[in-house]
Image: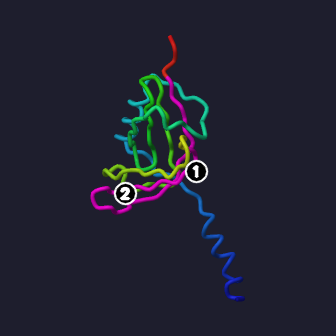
Amino acid sequence: MRAWMALTPLLLAGCTGSYAPEPLTQRQAADLDKALAGKVAGEPQTCINREPQTNLTVISNNVLLYRVSRNLVYKNELIGTCSGLTSGSTIIVQSYGSQMCRGDMATAANLQTGITTGGCAIGAFIPYRTPKP
């Protein structure tokens, strides 16, 4: 019993590491710039509605774009890295209700093999809108 109590601080210290996302490659940065060209960032939002159906674009293993319309795109920087997204894995989000929210857990999986390739959490949604003329 005492051994467990002595190890507890070490176990907790191992859980407090910081996360630093991988920087985007030149191609990923160019794809992101192209997708957000002419749009202006708004205040981050905690949740977005799943309806209307959004179009997902994978920029990197930790940056996703949700295109709602020509004029509205949400950028999401995942918390953690869902390895495998850039090589064709599918992201499976475990959320409840009609909204997807920051902190919802996600898994990257290869649907052909059934192998899980990574795990992460959804980050804040940053809206990018085309300014009105």
- Residue in the picture at 38% in, 43% down: 58
On the image, the x and y values in percent for residue 128 come to 51, 29
Label the magenta part by its dominant secondary structure.
Answer: strand
Between 54 and 21, the residue placed more toward the observer is: 54
> Which portion, as a residue range, is magenta?
101-129
The image quadrant where one finds the N terminus is bottom right
On the image, the x and y values in percent for residue 54 come to 43, 35
The answer to whether 86 appears left or right of 78 in the picture is: left
Question: Considering only vertical position in the picture, is 11 above or below 4?
Answer: above
Q: Was residue 110 drawn as part of the magenta stretch in this picture?
A: yes
Residue lying at the far left of the rendered structure: 112
Amino acid type for the residue under numbered disc 1: Gly
Q: Was residue 67 drawn as part of the magenta stretch in this picture?
A: no
The answer to whether 17 appears left or right of 6 in the picture is: left
On the image, the x and y values in percent for residue 70 come to 41, 24
Q: Secondary structure at mark 2?
A: strand
Residue lying at the far top of the rendered structure: 133
Which circle marks residue 103 in the picture?
1
Which circle marks residue 109 in the picture?
2
Question: Considering only vertical position in the picture, is 38 above or below 32?
Answer: above
- Comes first in the chain, label 1 or label 2: 1
Q: Secondary structure at mark 1?
A: loop
Question: Considering only vertical position in the picture, is 126 above or below 116?
Answer: above
Which circle marks residue 115 in the picture?
none
- Residue in the picture at 55% in, 46% down: 123
Amino acid type for the residue under numbered disc 2: Ala
Q: Answer yes or no: do the residues labelled 1 and 2 have beta carbons within 8 Å? A: no
